[in-house]
Structure formats: C-alpha cells, structure tokens
Amino acid sequence: MQLDLGNNIRQLRRRDKRTQEQLADALGVTSQAVSRWEAGGSYPDMNLIPSIANYFGVTIDELFGYHNERESRINALVSQIQAMKWKNNGIDADLNESIAFARNALVEFPGNERLMACLASLLYAAGYSRYGEHHLTDSEGYDIYDTQRHGGYTEWTEAVALYEKALLTLEDGDFRQVAVGELTQLYVNMGMYEKSRALAEKAPSIYSTKEYMRICACDGKERVQAYGQAILGMLHACAVLMVQDVLAAKQNMTISEKVGGIQGAIRIFDAVCTDGNYGEHNRLIARMYTQLSLYLWLDGKHDEAFEALDQSLDHFRQFEDLCAKEEPAYTAPLLKQVKVDFSRSPIPDPSDPDTTAVSLYKDWPWWSVEEATQVKQEMQADPRWDTWVARTHLMNR
C-alpha cells in the first residue's frame, strides 16, 4: 500500500517553517524517526496520527491528502483485505503481508471500526492457520476446547481486543454479524464463557435473520425465491450442526450412532433437493462423505468406507460441472427461482489445489478427530486409497 503520509508531513512542516527536531520534540519521538517518516522508510505509530494532525492544525483526512475521498478509500481497503483473507482461508498463503497491509490501513484511518474488524478477522484466521484449533475430552467424555493452549495465541488475544473495540461503533449488517460470530468463537476458544454467552444472548433469533427477513420484505416471485434461499441456508447450517454435534459427543455416542448422524446430515438436503441437484452444497456433501468414511472404517465397514470416498468424488464432480455452467440454477420444485450461490464455496482453480478435488484427500477427513491419524494410516495401507487419490488428480486435468 502506497501512502503519501511522509511527503505530506514534510510539506506541512515546511509550510509552518518547523524543523524535524521541533516536530519530534512535540510528539515525544526522535528526529531520526521523523526523518524516516518523511523518507517513506516507516510510518508513525497509529496513536500518533491525531497528534500530528493537531500539531499542523489539519484533519486526519487532510494529513493523508484526502478530499471527499475517505469512504471510497476505506471501501477499497476493506475489499482488498477481505480478498486477502479469502486467499488465506484455511492456509497461510501470505498472512504476514496481509496483516501488515491491514495494520497500515489502520495507520491511514485510525480507529475505523470496519478496518479494525478486518484486521481482527485476519488475526482470527491466522490463529487457525498457524496453530490450529485444539480439543480435549472432559470428565464426562464430551469434547471441550483446549482453552489454556488457545490462550497463548497472540493473534487471537489481539483479535479479541480489536473486535471488542470495533463493536462499540460497528453498525448493524454483515460486518457486525461476522464480528459477533468470530468474537463469540474466540471467547469460547479461550475460555471466556461468560462473555461468549452474553454476546450470544444479544444475537437475534432465527426469525430475525437476514434470510428470514427477506421473506417478510418480498412478495410474489421474489418471495418464493427468498423462501428457497432461506431453506437452503438453514439446511446447510443444520447439516454442519449435525456433524459438529457428532464430534462434540465423543465418547457419548457409539461409532454406529456417529455413522448414522453423518448419514442423516448428508440426507437432510434430499427433502428439498428432490431431483438430486444439490447446487453449491455438493461441495459440503463431498466433505461430509469424507467424514463418513472415517466412521465407517472405525465401524469395521471398510468396503462402505471406500464407497463413501467415491461418493465424495462424485459430489465434487457435480460441483465442478455446476461451476462450468454459464447460469447454474436449482431445478427442484421448491427451488426453481433460486440461483446458485458460490459465496460459501470457492470455484475450483486448477492452479490452487486447495480449491480442487485434490483437497479431499489433502484435508481428509475435513473435520479433525483424534482417531483420524490412525485411521488414515490404515486406509492408506489399502490399495484402494491410492486409486482414490489418483482419481482426485484426474478430475483436475
């Protein structure tokens, strides 16, 4: 990100006939620091920006050289940071550079709640990508977060502080919803249960969600479309919740019950997608089948485990075929007016294996469980594993 801040400071200092030493004394920094700012070698600390603007009698926008361009510039920075986060979704592609970019954006616009939320979200993702989410088993055999370990993630500690500050002024909308959701998760990850529950209690009920309110706000064809979108959104959420419920139960469900739970999560879409066109949800279903293969293997059903892996590939193939269409759409009676939405599922990019079918075996079984390492070793010893892996590569040629 190119800033003219240093040049603007130099021009203002010369305008007022001040020396670098005088400015440095007024700000409590060294003259060498001021020299580096003006040369573009570094930027002032965020908390110094208001003092510099006050020293020269200008607004912060004027200090940065903006004239009625503030919102456009902030929107552009927000869009770029969000694109960076998507690139680092689940991996550490260039998190250091992305975080540095977001920090510089906050130097440019100190205290902007959207930029604070953007940086917090990057740090949230960084904790997962760099260290992972870790779990323990409590005395009753249920899954719990390793809060002591998570508490040592400096990225998450900073993200909590940024989100708490941003939420004081962040307006209602998608930004606030993401912030509340990620902060609630961070509170739980780090053992701040009272704060997480308090934040959750302030959230709207399911009947006040954006998807449901769209139904109330529309009529005619648009209302039918809104119904379909809401149904699909809720099915997606229910399927994920069912899988996560299985994982959280740990020792309190038998392996056979876990198999049934995952199978139920997969079948939940059949009630609405009656013609087998699952749209963008094919990607989620593919992931659930990889998870199912793990529990089928543990249940001694080894043939069915590999059949589940084949089903996973079939659904990913359907997803890729859908992505190749000009105007992909649903065809089931309840969904005829609904357009396919790829916002939850990135379109496969052959140059990025993490978005293609190759990710099915790289990320197997997607949702991490304690037994995964042992089961994967056992399945890899079966020649059918290599055949399946080879098929994931063939799909991307």
Image: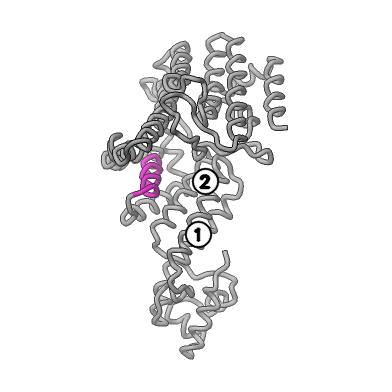
- Position in image of residue 161 (x %, y %): 38, 52
- Position in image of residue 336 (x %, y %): 45, 29
The answer to whether residue 221 is above or below residue 266 is below
Q: Which residue is mark 1?
A: 76
In this orientation, which residue lies closer to the viewer: 248 or 182? Answer: 182
- Which residue type carries mark 2? Ala
The outermost residue toward the front is 220
Give the main secondary structure of the magenta stretch. helix
Picture quadrant of residue 162: bottom left
User: Would you say residue 35 is visible in this rendering?
Assistant: yes
Crowdedness of circle 1 by 10 Å Cα count: few (<14), some, many (20+)?
A: few
Rendered image: mark on residue 126 = 2
Q: Are marks 2 and 1 in contact (CB under 8 Å)?
A: no
Label 1 secondary element: helix
Crowdedness of circle 2 by 10 Å Cα count: few (<14), some, many (20+)?
A: many
- Identify the residue at horizontal 50%, vertical 26% (top origin): 278
Q: Nearer the viewer, mark 2 or mark 1?
A: 1
Q: For the magenta stretch, what is the residue range?
A: 173-186
The answer to whether residue 347 is above or below residue 317 is below
